[in-house]
Amino acid sequence: MKILEAQSATLTNVEVYQFLQKQAKEYQEQKRRGPGNLETLRRELLQYFETHPGPLSQKPPAYDETSISRLLERLRPYEITKGEMIMILNMRPTNPVALNTVIEDMEVRFGPEQQEDISAGIAEVLGQFPEQEEADEDQGDVMETTEDR
């Protein structure tokens, strides 16, 4: 692989995921294997993308051209930068607290109602995560406090 133009475009996790799946399928159809380190990297990245809490672990949402363009249209009034939009697609924040980690100076740029509307727009277009109870059950009793003893 040869890089012709460094940083000519920034890829979202969805685009990387789709590329890796396509490449794996092409290699499988051609009945060939890539270098061992490439196979390991591809397998581990796909596994990372498909496990909880990653946004791609939930099936659906459908990250396709229509949903991405719907999200862009939905958030257009808020003048969200390209970098922030990529982070929104990568992290899929569905509440203002998580959104604060993605949008720079969010409290200054947007009021509470706007923050809720942005979060609602993301959840509306890309879907909600499963309820937190499921994730809590998976965690079990991870940390024991001195009061529990």
Image (tube, grey):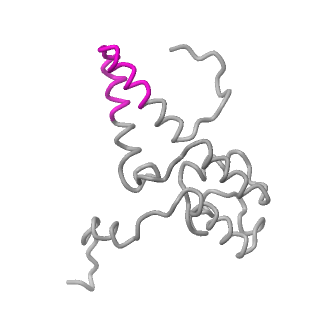
**Above or below, comparing residue 33 to residue 107 in the picture:** above
Image quadrant assignment for residue 79: bottom right
Task: Say left or right for 145 vs 60.
Answer: left
Image quadrant assignment for residue 116: bottom right
Image point (52%, 41%), residue name = 14
Q: Nearer the viewer, residue 143 or 81?
A: 81
Report x, y in % for residue 141: 25, 72
Q: Nearer the viewer, residue 23 or 12?
A: 23
Q: Nearer the viewer, residue 57 or 2?
A: 57
Give the residue at the far bottom of this rendering.
Answer: 147
Task: Say left or right for 21 vs 70.
Answer: left
Report x, y in % for residue 33: 31, 16
Image point (41%, 44%), residue name = 49
Image quadrant assignment for residue 53: bottom left
Task: Say left or right for 59 vs 71.
Answer: left
In the rendered image, residue 94 lying in the magenta stretch gets the answer: no
**Above or below, comparing residue 65 to residue 54 in the picture:** above
Which region of the structure is painted magenta?
Answer: 21-43
Image point (34%, 16%), residue name = 35
Report x, y in % for residue 57: 40, 51
In the rendered image, residue 22 lying in the magenta stretch gets the answer: yes
- By secondary structure, the bulk of the magenta-drawn segment is best described as helix
**Above or below, comparing residue 3 to residue 79 in the picture:** above
Report x, y in % for residue 65: 61, 42
Give the residue at the far front of this rendering.
Answer: 66
Q: Nearer the viewer, residue 142 or 1?
A: 1
Image point (55%, 56%), residue name = 126
Could you tell me which quadrant the C terminus lies in?
bottom left
